[in-house]
Amino acid sequence: MKTKMFAAVLVAAVTVPAFAQSTPVIDQRQANQEVRIQQGVASGQLTPREAGRLEAGQQRVENMETRAKADGVVTAGERARISQAQDVQSRRIARQKHDRQHDFNHNGRVDRRR
């Protein structure tokens, strides 16, 4: 009887943190934003400096997610803060991709309209 109870507790202890740490919506959104940044670099819409800043912002959001997962439970408040940070990053990506700074020839310098 004790071994069955121990096994049940062990399975619960292993299963619950793995389930709680799963954040597929947050992870998918992070991946989508990473793709948007890479597309901006490839098309020349983002300069290397802009891309670096956006990548740093993405890393900050990733760090927020890591801290939220640290205790095994991502609360609704933590999800809301992460979602809000992702909203901010999304707006920054859009703003930087559509400003007048471009690097169409990929030489690391800003191309200006003439």
Image (spheres, helix red, strand yellow):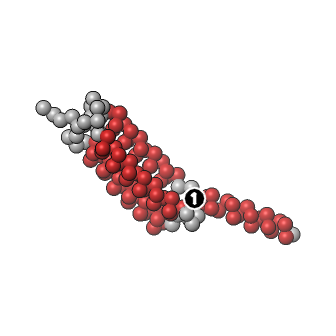
In the rendered structure, the answer to whether residue 113 lies left or right of residue 41 reads left
Q: Nearer the viewer, residue 31 or 48?
A: 48
In the displayed structure, would residue 93 be above or below residue 61?
above
The extreme left residue here reads 114
Quadrant containing the N terminus is bottom right
Q: Hey, which quadrant is residue 105 in on the image?
A: top left
Count of marks, rendered view = 1
- Is 91 displayed left or right of 15 in the figure? left
Which residue position holds label 1? Answer: 21
Kindly identify the residue that appears in the image at 49 percent across and 50 percent down. 27
* Residue occupying the far top of the picture: 105
Q: Residue 6's spot in the image, x, y percent?
A: 79, 67
Q: Is residue 49 above or below residue 61?
A: above
For the residue pair 84 and 41, the one nearer the viewer reads as 41
Point out residue 81 in the picture as x, y percentages from the top left corner.
41, 63
**Closer to the camera in the image, 110 or 62:** 110
Compared across the picture, whether 48 is left or right of 21 comes to left
Give the x, y percent position of residue 78.
46, 65
For this view, does 110 lie left or right of residue 90?
Answer: left
Q: Quadrant of residue 114?
A: top left
- Identify the residue at horizontal 34%, vertical 43% (top origin): 51
Q: Report the residue at 29% width, 39% height from top.
A: 47
Looking at the picture, which amino acid does disc 1 mark?
Gln
Residue at figure coordinates x 53%, y 55% from the top left: 23
In this rendering, the answer to whether 100 lies above or below 18 is above
